[in-house]
Image: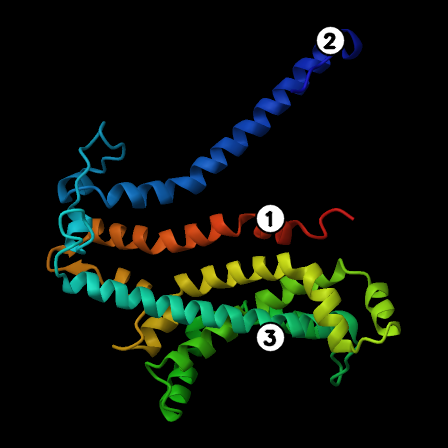
Amino acid sequence: MVSIDFDKYGRGQCMRWWAMRFVVYGLLITWAIVCIFPLFWTVSTSFKTAADVMRGNLVPWFNFEPSWLGWRSLGLSPDTIFETSTVREEFMRRLWNSSIISVSASTFAVVLGTLAAYGLSRFSYKFGFMRNSDISFFFLSQLIMPPVVLALPFLVLYKELALLDTYSGMIAVYTLMVLPIVVWIMRDQFATVPVELEEAALVDGLSIWGAFLRIVVPLILPGMVAAFILALILCWNEYFFAALLTSTHTNTLPVMIASQTGSQGINWWSMAALSTAGILPLVFVGVLLEKHIIAGMTAGAVK
């Protein structure tokens, strides 16, 4: 608990200090509400009826009485969870597809991105006019280009290679999609590891790969976990390539969520229930690996 000595600092200065704290915490609370509100709206909408959605009621048990309508339409309500449901089977299939594709692509991206970042941080390269900094910026520039620009090339290429609606095709495109951000995250992680540790390992008889695997990797493991989680979130929520390059066998969950339309419009309650169910695995992973995520994101912040 922070205490202020009024006699030492003066009442005016102390009042300004408290006013500044009030402003800072007020802004933080406001920003937290803005960030949490979409999640609250999604979860609450999954328990609304059509009339409650149209009226814009927000607070459960105050504006509206919660209902299992959205979850019942998916076969995920308490009274339908043990009954046969084709919609629930389709949801589980899409959830499985999203899990396989996202986890595999994120794993490949972290492995390849870690190796690329290690090379860029420890060795000097020259490709024409390009140096290490230029190569690093090239990776970052891939995030600037909108995905729609790649739609036709990927569609033609995947058709020629028979990769449409396949796990390998989706894993490949998702790996390429998240690889640049992984490279940039891991470059910052390697910058926190002193080169002298690797030199000492080489003197002791380890090879470059031995020093990398036994000395460097344990030190940057939190950063690898943070990069994996970020890549997993980006792959899990990706819609454009999933809708473009899949049709029946490898459709992911975002495609199913976006398809919740009927003859009278969008079934917001079903879409919200699907979104809530799709968010829960990421929440579980985030809670399970929270310590590693924080350690990885803050590595190098304080020297």
Please identify the quarter of the rendering in which residue 53 is found. top left
Amino acid of disc 1: Ile
Residue at (66, 74) in percent of width and height: 115
Amino acid of disc 2: Phe
Q: Nearer the viewer, residue 294 or 260?
A: 294
Q: In the picture shown, does residue 75 fall above or below 122?
A: above
Mark 2, Cα crowd under 10 Å, few <14 / some 14-19 / many 20+, is few
Mark 3, Cα crowd under 10 Å, few <14 / some 14-19 / many 20+, is some
Q: Is residue 232 left or right of residue 90?
A: right
Mark closer to the observer (2, 3): 3
Q: CA distance from mark 1 to mark 2?
A: 37 Å
Q: In the picture shown, does residue 18 fall above or below 217?
A: above
Question: Which mark is drawn over residue 6?
Answer: 2
Q: CA distance from mark 2 to mark 3?
A: 57 Å
Residue topped by disc 1: 294
Q: Whole-percent x and y of residue 2? A: 67, 20
Residue at (44, 65) in percent of width and height: 235
Q: Is the N terminus in the top left, top right, bottom left or bottom right quadrant?
A: top right
Residue topped by disc 3: 112
Secondary structure found at label 3: helix
Q: Whole-percent x and y of residue 276? A: 31, 50
Q: In the picture shown, does residue 120 fall above or below 70?
A: below
State the scheme by which the image is colored. rainbow
Q: Whole-percent x and y of residue 189? A: 69, 60
Residue at (64, 64) in percent of width and height: 184
Q: Residue furthest right?
A: 203
